[in-house]
Image: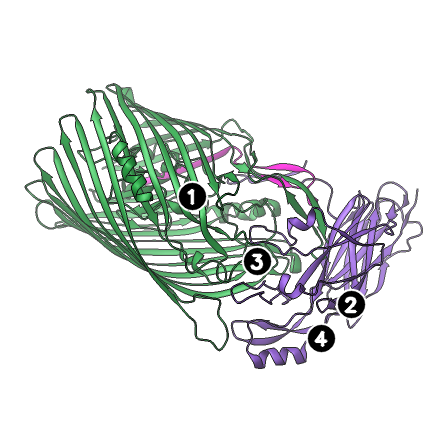
Chain colours: A purple, B green
Amino acid sequence: MRRACLLVLAACAPDLGPPEYLVDRPRVIAVQASPAEVAPGQAATFRVLAVGPDGPLDASAAAWGLCTAPLPLTETGTVASACAGDLPVVARGSNPTLSTSPDACSLFGPIATSETHRARNPDATGGFYQPMRVQTEGATAFAQERLLCPLAQATLPVALDFQRRYTPNQNPTIERFAASIPLDAVPKGTHVELTVTVGTASMEVFPLFEPAPQALVDTSETLTVSWYATAGALLEAQTTVEGVSAQNEWIAPSTGGRTFLWAVLHDSRGGVDMAQLAPQVAP
Amino acid sequence: MRLAVALALCAFGALAQELEGSVEGERRKDAGEIGMRASEARDLAGSHGDAVVAAQMLPGIAREPAGSGQLVVWGALPAETRLAIDGIDVPALYHGGGLRSVVPTELVRRIDLLPAAFGASWGRALGGVLDVEMAAPETASARAAADPLDAHAAASATFAAGRAFAGVRYSLLDRILGPHLSETAREVFPLPRYLDGQLVASFDLRAHETLEVLLFGSSDTESRSVGQGAFARGDDNLDRWGRLGLRYRRQLDDGADTTIVAWAGDQVTSLGSFADLGFSGQTSWAQSAGLRAAYRMPLGDVSDVSFGVDGIFTRTHLRRNGSLTTPAREGDVRAFGEPPGVDVAFDDWTVGQGDVALFLESNLSFGDFTISPGFRAVAIASDVSALVPLVPTTAPLGSSQLEILPEPRLQVAYRASDRLRVFAAAGLHHQAPAPEDLSATFGAPTLTSSSAVHIAAGAAYRIANHWTSEATGYLRLLDDLPTRSPRPTPLLAQAFVEQGTGKAYGVQAVLRWQGASGWSGFFSALVSRSERQDVPGGPTRLFDFDQPLALTAAGSWRLGRNILGARVRYASGFPRTPVQGSFFDVQQGREEPLFGAQNSERLPAFFALDLSAARTFSLGAGRTLRVYVELENATAHANAEDYVYSSDWSTRGIVEGLPPLALLGAEIVL
C-alpha cells in the first residue's frame, strides 16, 4: 500500500484497489442513447458496451429498467437508492428501444406537479435526465437519458428565445482511435501513445440559461474521454478533448497476450460514443 | 409543553453547584461549568503554548476530528455552542485546522466552558457556551515568538490611566510545508493560511471602574486543488471577521456591580468546492451588533440578584449556487471523497435577525442550600427577503416573523459538608435558525427557533487540599431541529423541515490535582450517547459526532524554570455509514456508492500520547527567552480519521491522523 504522508500537520491516505481504468471484472462502461435527448414519453434506442478482463462481453441478455424515483434531498449521488433495488425489467438485449416516462419532466425536471411543490434543479448544462438501469452478468450501471424539458424560471421572451435557439443534443463521434505504433506485436513495457480524434461536429454550442441575469449564454460542450484497459497501465483515466483530439499513454503489460483498450467519449450534455483497440503484446 | 416540562424538571431538580478547581472569587458557577486559567492551560501538552487551544481538551468536549477545530459539547453540534470573547459573540475561536486560536495567550485571563443548563444571563445556544476572558497585560513588554505554525509579535504598555496591548500573528505552516507535500496529502488536509490581530486598551476611570476598548479580527483562507482541467477538484474557503467592542465595568462600595458590553462586527465567508466542472459555493456578508448589560446587587451577605439585557442584531446577505446537498450537513449519509451533487441551483437572499433577551437571576442562600432561579424572556424577530424562489418579473415576497420565547432556568446546590456539594440544574433554551438555512431555494425561509431542555445533576467532592473531583450527569432533549425534507417531492421553499429531534445523555467525571510540588493536572472521563431522529416516527440514528467514551489525562510538572507536560487521550471513533455496494454511473464515468444503515458502524478508537517541555531563560533586566518543544502522538499510533474507499467502493482503508509531530518554538519577552 502506497502512502502519502505529511511531515507535520496531516495524515496518510492510502491508495486503494486497482486503478479505475483497469477492467478486472465485468463492467458496463458505456451506454449510448439515440437520439441523445428526447421529449418525455419519446423512445430512444440504447447501445451498451459491456466488457470484462477478456474483452467485450455479450450483452444480449442485459436487463433494462426504468427508474421513476427522483433523487430525494436526503440522498447524495446521482440516482435514487430506490432505483438501485427492485426495479421491473422493461426490456432485454444489447440494443433495446425504451421510452422515457410521459411525466419525466415533472419527475426529474423543472415542471412542478403543483404550485406548492418545488421543481428539480438542472445540471451545469441546464439538463434533466431520467436514469435507465442496465444489468449484465456481474455488473450494474445507470445510463441517463437527457430530457427535452421547457425552461423554468425564465421570462417569456427568454423562454421563447431559448425554444428558438436550443437544439437537442447529438451524440459526439469518435472518428479515429489510434496508437503511435502498430499493435500486432507490442513489446512488453512499451509506452504507446493513444489518440482519439473526434468528429468536427461533436463539440456543439448550446444556449445555457443563467437565472440571475435572465440571460442565455452560448456555451460549448466539454468533451472528455474515459479510458479503460484490461492490462497494462494508462497515464490518465480521463482526459479532455483539446481541439479535435485527446491523448493518453498506455504502457504495455509485462505479460504477453491479447489486451483490450476502450475509449468512451462523453459530451457534457450526456452524449456518448465509444471505440476499441485490441493490441497483441508480444510473448 | 416544553415550558411545562422544563418547569417540572426544575421543580424536581435538586441542586446547583459551584465547581472547585480553578474557581476564582465568589463568581457564580453553573452545573458542569469548568474553567482554566490561561497560565495553566498554556503548559499543557498538545496546546502548542496556546491557552485557548488547550480548551479543546476540557472535559465535556468530544475529541474533535483532526484538523477541524470544531467543538462538540455534550452531544451538541459545533454550531449549537456559543463562542464569546469577553461576552462578545464571535464566529470562531480557532483558525482553520484548530491548531491555533484567534487570541494570543498573553491576552487571555481564563476560559470557561458552560456545557449545559447554564444561567439566564446566557442563551442563544442549544449546546454550551465557551467564553474567553481577556485582559491587557499589567506590565509593559514586547514579545516575539515563532514556531513552525506561525510567527507572533505583540507589545503592551502601561500609562497613567491604564494599559494597552497590540498583537499580530501570521501563519507559516503553508509556506514551510506546502511545497513539500504530495498531491494526495494536499487533498486530504488543506494547509490553512491565517492572520489575526488585536488591539486592547484599558482605562481606569474611578476606583473599581474600568472602560476597555477591544478590537480584534481574524482571517483564514484555505485552498486545495488536485487534478487538472475538466477533472480538477478542490475547495476554496475564506473566512474574515472583526469585532470592535467597548466594555464598561464598575464595582460599587455596597458590593453591587455592573457590566456593559457593546460591540459591532463584520464577517465575510466564502465556501466553494468544485469537481468535474461542477461548482458549489456560498458567500455571505454579515454585519452584526450586540449589547450585553448586567447589574448585580447583593441581597444580604450571601445572596444576590442580577438582571440585564442580552441582544444581538445581524443582517446577512447570502449568495449560493451549486448542489442542494453540498456542503453536507449533520445527518447526511455520505462517504469521504464522495463528489458533490451534479444539480445546480442559485439563490441570493438577505436575512435580518434580532435576538433580544431580558434576564433575571438570583442566588438565594438558605444555610447550606443555594437556590438560583432565573428567567430569560427572549424575543426573536427575523426578516427574510424571499419567501419563495425568485420568479422573474415578480417582486420578491419576503417573510417576517416574531417569536416570544420564555426560558426558565433553575439551579439548586446543597453543601452536605465542607468537602461535598451536590447540585442539579435545568433550563429551557432556544436558538434561532442559521441565515444559510433560510434560503427559499436551498432551505426554508419559514424555519423558526429550535429548542432544547437541559438537565444536569451531580456532585463535587474535595478529596484533599490539592485534590478535587466532580461528577455530572446530563440530559439534553432537542426539538424542532431543521432537517432535509424527506418527501419524494418536497414542497416549495421547504427543502428543510423543522421535524428533527434529538437526545443526548451521559456522565462526566473529573479528577483534578494542583499545587503539590509543582504538579498539576486532571483526569476526565465522559460516557455519553447522542441520538437524532430526522422525522417523527422515523428511525433513530446516532448523532454524527456521537462519542460514547472519551478519556483524557493531562498534567504538567513545574521544576524551577522548566516545565514538563504530558497528555494521554482515548476516545471512541465517530459513527460512519457503511458502503455496501455500488453501481456505475455511465454519464459521470464513476462508481456511485450504495449505503447501508445510517451511522451503523464506527471508526476505530483514537489514542494519542503527547509530550511537551519548556524552559525559560533569563536574559537580564526582566527579559526572558522561552524555548519549548512538543511531541504529539509520541507512540506513532495510527489513528483513523475517516474511511476512504477505492474507486469502485469495494475496498476500504483509513485516513490516518497525525503522525508523530514535533514542534520547536521560541518566545522572547523584552
| Above or below, B476 relative to A158 | above
- Chain letter of mark 4 equals A
Q: Which residue is mark 2?
A: A35
Mark 1 and mark 2: Cα distance apart in space = 49 Å
Mark 3 and mark 4: Cα distance apart in space = 29 Å
- Chain letter of mark 2 equals A
Q: Residue at x 17, y 34 (%)?
A: B26
Q: Read off the magenta span.
A: B643-670
Q: Are marks 4 and 2 on the same chain?
A: yes
Q: Are marks 2 and 3 on the same chain?
A: no
Nearer the N terminus, badge 4 or badge 2?
A: 2
Q: Can residue B345 be seen in the rendering of this structure? A: yes
Screen quadrant of the C terminus of chain B: top left
Q: Nearer the viewer, mark 2 or mark 3?
A: 3
Q: Residue at x 20, y 19 (%)?
A: B417
Q: Nearer the viewer, mark 3 or mark 1?
A: 3
Q: How far from the left and from the top, in percent, is residue B643?
A: 59, 38
Left or right? Give the position of B637 relative to B668: right
Left or right? Give the position of B191 relative to B56: right
Q: Which residue is mark 1?
A: B77
Mark 4 touching mark 2, by CB under 8 A? Answer: no
Q: Residue at x 49, y 65 (%)?
A: B347
Identify which amino acid the numbered label 1 is placed on. Answer: Leu
Q: Which residue is mark 4?
A: A167
Q: Which residue is mark 3?
A: B489
Q: How far from the left and from the top, in percent, is residue B489?
A: 57, 58
Q: How far from the left and from the top, in percent, is residue B21?
A: 27, 28
Q: Residue at x 65, y 48 (%)?
A: A81
Mark 1 touching mark 4, by CB under 8 A? Answer: no
Q: Nearer the viewer, mark 1 or mark 2?
A: 2
Mark 2 and mark 3: Cα distance apart in space = 28 Å
